[in-house]
Image (cartoon, grey):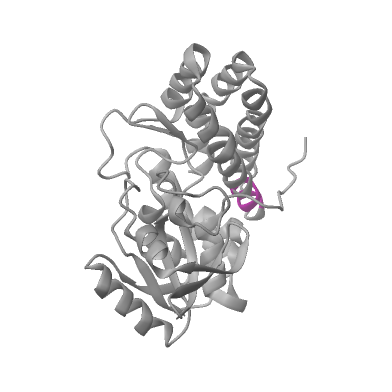
Amino acid sequence: MAHVPYIGSGPYCYANSFAMMFGDRAPSTAVIEFATGGPFGMQLVGGTLPFFDPYGWTPEAGFDDALAALGWASSVRRGGTAEQALAALESALADGPAWVGPVEMGYLRHQPGMTGPIGADHYVVVIALAEGRVLMHDPQGHPYATLPIEDFMAAWRAESVDYATPYTMRTAFRQVRAVTEEAAIEAALPMARRWLSMAEGRHVPAGTIGNAEAAERLAAMIESDCDRELRNHLVWFAVRVGARRVADAATCLARIGRGEAARIMDGQARLIGALQHPLVAGDDAAAAALLRALAPSYAELPAALA
């Protein structure tokens, strides 16, 4: 069955935010996502929270490698007090927009239903500060959104995002060399292999497991007691972004002639994407069966990427 690239909406906040910062020289979001290493693995953080991304991986862990593979660089600022961070942001905006995150999505009260922290990370592009409000492009579907500064600063503090350093932003984006998308995909392969091997993660939460073991454990969890919190996490976020990033990785691999690796990752994407209906419909036995079918693929992929 032929691989069909996906084009559409989905939770691709940091890839979309990077693309906005790159401007008219931006590669596709599929290539940006590939270059972060995010498609290469699966993890059950702390033994309970599933993500279809590598063992020990966080978005922050992949950003510098992604920028290097894509031929870009940026200046990063992290930490300090709220006052220092806001002053630094205001100063940076004199030279153009700022890439900000992770932020706690629950404080972004321009998004319907957001009333407080939910432990969800997000990334936005800040355009201006004026009259006590922040003007931003929020890639969750809100161009030119505004937010009171006090809500924005609470979000930017990111206390409830487990991997976050408060008040992180990137500015001064600059292209240091021209890189084709195909060359960027090739440049990212060594990092992809390291993430898949589970040798790359640092500061991994206790109890975290990866790849086939994570898929098998999640299948058992869903069969025994898929509570509302786990189900909502899967159907609103993890499955959607997981299926898309793995499908995008298959598209990227096909572009550089890695046909077997593309075939395996297309199969992974189909299995992850197929989880959506049984999880929404409450057919937990079917969802568990899909995860058990997914598990062996993580052992098949390394040879195809070698």
State the residue in front, 83 or 53.
Answer: 83
Furthest residue in direction left, as rendered? 80
Q: Residue at x 51, y 25 (%)?
A: 228
Q: Residue at x 64, y 33 (%)?
A: 267
Q: Is residue 206 magenta?
A: no
State the residue in front, 113 or 32.
Answer: 113
How far across and how far down the image is residue 279, in percent?
A: 61, 25
Figure label count = 0
- Where the N terminus falls, by quadrant? top right
Task: Judge whether 18 appears above or below 3 on screen.
Answer: below
Q: Residue at x 54, y 39 (%)?
A: 304
Tell me which secondary structure the magenta stretch mostly adopts: helix
Q: Is residue 294 left or right of residue 42?
A: right
Furthest residue in direction right, as rendered? 1
Q: Is residue 277 left or right of residue 145?
A: right
Name which quarter of the figure residue 158 lies in: bottom left
State the residue in front, 89 or 60.
Answer: 89
Q: Is residue 251 magenta?
A: yes
Name which quarter of the figure residue 173 lies in: bottom left
How far across and how far down the image is residue 10, in percent?
A: 62, 50
Furthest residue in direction bottom, as rendered? 94
How far across and how far down the image is residue 100, in percent?
A: 42, 66
How far across and how far down the image is residue 134, in percent?
A: 47, 72
State the residue in front, 44 or 292.
Answer: 44
Q: Is residue 249 left or right of residue 164?
A: right
Task: Judge whether 195 appears above or below 31 on screen.
Answer: above
Task: Judge whether 232 appears above or below 69 on screen.
Answer: above
Q: Is residue 179 visible?
A: no
Q: Is residue 213 visible?
A: yes
Magenta segment boundaries in residue numbering: 249-254
Q: Residue at x 37, y 81 (%)?
A: 90
